[in-house]
Amino acid sequence: MNRTRESYNILITDDDTGCREALREIVEPQGFRTLLASSGEEAVDLVRAATVHLALLDMHLPRMTGLEALRLMHQINAMLPCILVTADATASLIRQACQAHAYSVLHKPVSKGVVLYTVGRALVRHYGELLGGEAADETKG
């Protein structure tokens, strides 16, 4: 089923308001709807309560890491594509993320092009073609 970008809800989770808003300012102008969470617990609650098509999760959150939140989200929706964002993507973390079925691990500071490319590819892989062109086409900028 082909869907427009407006039909996708992207959950952005970061305890840093500036980082959360920066990610929102990258994806919303592309037509995606965003849900915002400041903690892993809040993110998991949103996945339980709302339709979430993709989650962007900061790794270092208070009380629960992004990886722990990802694992809980997959208990609710095993097919939910989740992308971890971290300033310290060690080999160990990347291995753990792969084992937890994270779609990708992005390095902070994130680039607009890399975020849009990764989000677009994850959505296409999990849901099929994005109408209006893939987000990967908009990596220039």
Image (cartoon, rainbow, N blue to C red):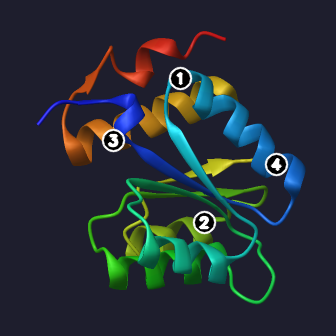
| Left or right: residue 76 compared with residue 140 | left
Instruction: Give the number of the disc on residue 19.
Output: 4
Residue most extreme to the bottom: 63
Q: Secondary structure at mark 1?
A: helix
Q: Between 87 and 139, which is closer to the camera in this rendering? A: 139
| Left or right: residue 30 compared with residue 60 | left
Residue 47 at x, y = what percent? 46, 72
Type of the residue with mark 2: Ala
Q: Residue at x 42, y 67 (%)?
A: 98
Image quadrant containing the C terminus: top right
Is residue 109 something one can see in this rendering? Answer: no
Distance CA(mark 2)–CA(mark 4): 23 Å
Q: Residues within 10 Å of mark 4 (few under 14, many from 20)?
A: some
Q: 15 above or below 21?
A: below
Distance CA(mark 4)–CA(mark 1): 18 Å
Instruction: Give the number of the disc on residue 123.
Output: 3
Q: Which residue is mark 1?
A: 30
Residue 110 at x, y = what percent? 72, 38
Type of the residue with mark 4: Cys
Camera-nearest label, 2 or 4: 4
Distance CA(mark 4)–CA(mark 3): 22 Å
Comes first in the chain, label 2 or label 3? 2
Image quadrant containing the N terminus: top left
Q: Residues within 10 Å of mark 2 (few under 14, many from 20)?
A: few
Q: Secondary structure at mark 2?
A: helix
Q: Are marks 4 and 3 in contact (CB under 8 Å)?
A: no
Comes first in the chain, label 2 or label 4? 4
Q: Secondary structure at mark 3?
A: helix
Q: Which residue is mark 2?
A: 91
